[in-house]
Amino acid sequence: MADIVRSVKGTRDFYPDGMAVRRWMFDIIRDVSTRFGYQEYEGPCLEFLDLYAAKSGEELVKEQSFVFSSPGDDMLTLRPELTPTLARMVAQKQYEIPLPLRWWSIGPFWRYENPQRGRTREFYQWNIDLVGTETAAADAELVAVAATFLKETGLSPDQVQIYVNNRRLMDQAFSTLKIAKEIRPQIFKVVDKLDKLSEKEWRTFAMESGLDEIQVDGLLELLNNGELWRDSEELVQFFELIKTFGVEDYIAYNPKVIRGLDYYTGTVFEAFELGGQSRAILGGGRYDNLVSDVGGMRLPGVGFAMGDVVIELVLQDAGMIPDRLESKPQVMVTVFNENTLTGSLQIAHILREAGYRTVIYPEADKMGKQFKYADRLDIPLAVILGPDEMANGKVAVKNLKTREQVTVNQPAMVDQIQKFLPSTP
RNA sequence: GUGCCUGUAGCUCAAUGGUGGAGCGCCUCACUGUGGAUGAGGAGGCCGUGGGUUCGACCCCCAUCAGGCACCCCA
């Protein structure tokens, strides 16, 4: 093991078992996205640094992006998020694309962070957006898409919840508390910290952020008011409409959800694991100025993003990932000796024509070794074509799970295999 | 960027400063037309790397690299 070049820090290797899990998750994402009528799209993984400088936070671009200069001296970056790309793509064809548009995507992203549990430097992210409309129905649809996904993975409303809030409502409430506009971005952080600090620490942090004692008390009361949504016409409408999607159980109002991003303007939402770690699974909201930020017209939209790393951990911990995912071979044809090789290849061909996932042992070897190989690959059936079988136009079909073995005429082979195979391939 | 922990066989891990072990896995054989079991044998290591302390270092010290966890941040 001396000199194997190691993998890049924060990247993951997807061996077949891991790839099967990813495939399974991505298939659910695709299924849910398309069932709601969204179209798949994709942008480049490389973008000019300028694209992010326009809008994304300083920290994201300067500290957490892979930035480098190309041989032609352009400053490029491996995309840390998709939204600016989406905004650019929409702005470039703003008069051609039928609006509102419903687009979804899943692809790789990179952020230069210190890897730890639930966080890698290279990850996949599901993005889905509805652009060009501003209704509460649109907000409800996106939240419903998210909830439907969670439901399809098998997670229950006891295990995961989508918390919804509204930026305008919070702004209004902050005004009532006479919190100055200038410090509101900081106050959003204070809100965000509520569940992460002890009450004493949180109070100190809140005071340091510019609030007086009365405001802190008012804020605390606000954030524990589960009925606050009734003050927002948008949210009242939202919660009325969301009932029609059949996933109401997954959705709740929560005044503590604010989202870190500056560009959210209305509805914001975030899905959390309810169990021990209460990890954030996905997040999104309504934005009004994304497209205009990159030089297009003002187009309102709503969308969310979900990374693949945390959701996989949540699903794993919840035991929701099915055991048998990989499309493993169903049949292995053995090779008795050089003289039977051609016959074995023909048998394999017949099986493939019949639709079975079939491999052939790649060389003549002891039967025991061949069976052991099949067993280690978890292949349930073996077909044996030895000199005896070949002389009589027969073939032996062996069930490696039950050790049962039947010798049949070659035309009856497929029937015999069907009898042995578990009902679901 | 900051802190804590860990680097020993393919994997999981032991080893009081005195010649490096186990379990699992792997290979061979018992078994030249039949796998998981059993038994017997075998291969496999510059103890992450570089310095230092010591008569002597896997062990102690320093540095460095890598990994894990947490903080920061979370678009």
Image (cartoon, helix red, strand yellow):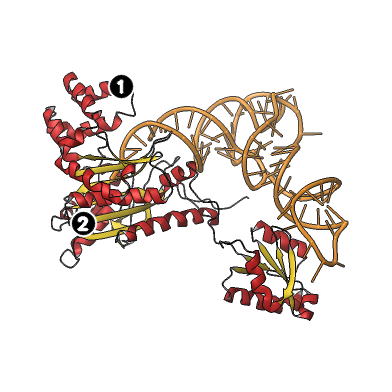
Q: Residue at x 72, y 59 (%)?
A: A372
Query: Residue B56, relative to residue A287: is it above or below?
Result: above
The percent position of residue A333, horizontal first and vertical second, equals 68, 70
Position of the C terminus of chain A by quadrant: bottom right
> Toward the viewer: A257 or A228?
A228
Which residue type carries mark 1? Glu
Which class describes the residues within 10 Å of circle 1: few (<14), some (14-19), or many (20+)?
A: few
> Toward the viewer: A157 or A117?
A157
Q: CA distance from mark 1 to mark 2?
A: 40 Å
Judged from the image, the secondary structure of the residue bearing numbered disc 1 is: helix
Q: Residue A273 appears in which quarter of the rendering?
A: top left
Residue wearing tag 2:
A131
Q: Residue A331 appears in which quarter of the rendering?
A: bottom right
Confirm whether residue A264 shows in the render.
no
> Toward the viewer: B18 or A190?
A190
Query: Residue A305, relative to residue A389: is it above or below?
Result: above
Which class describes the residues within 10 Å of circle 2: few (<14), some (14-19), or many (20+)?
A: many
Query: Residue A25, relative to residue A180: is it above or below?
Result: below
The mark nearer the N terminus, 1 or 2, is 2
Is residue A381 found left or right of B75 in the rendered image?
A: right
Q: Chain of mark 1?
A: A
The percent position of residue A203, horizontal first and vertical second, equals 26, 21
Q: Residue at x 18, y 68 (%)?
A: A96
Q: Work out whether disc 1 and disc 2 sit on a shared chain.
A: yes
Q: Chain of mark 2?
A: A
Q: Residue at x 35, y 51 (%)?
A: A148
Residue wearing tag 1:
A199
Judged from the image, the secondary structure of the residue bearing numbered disc 2 is: strand
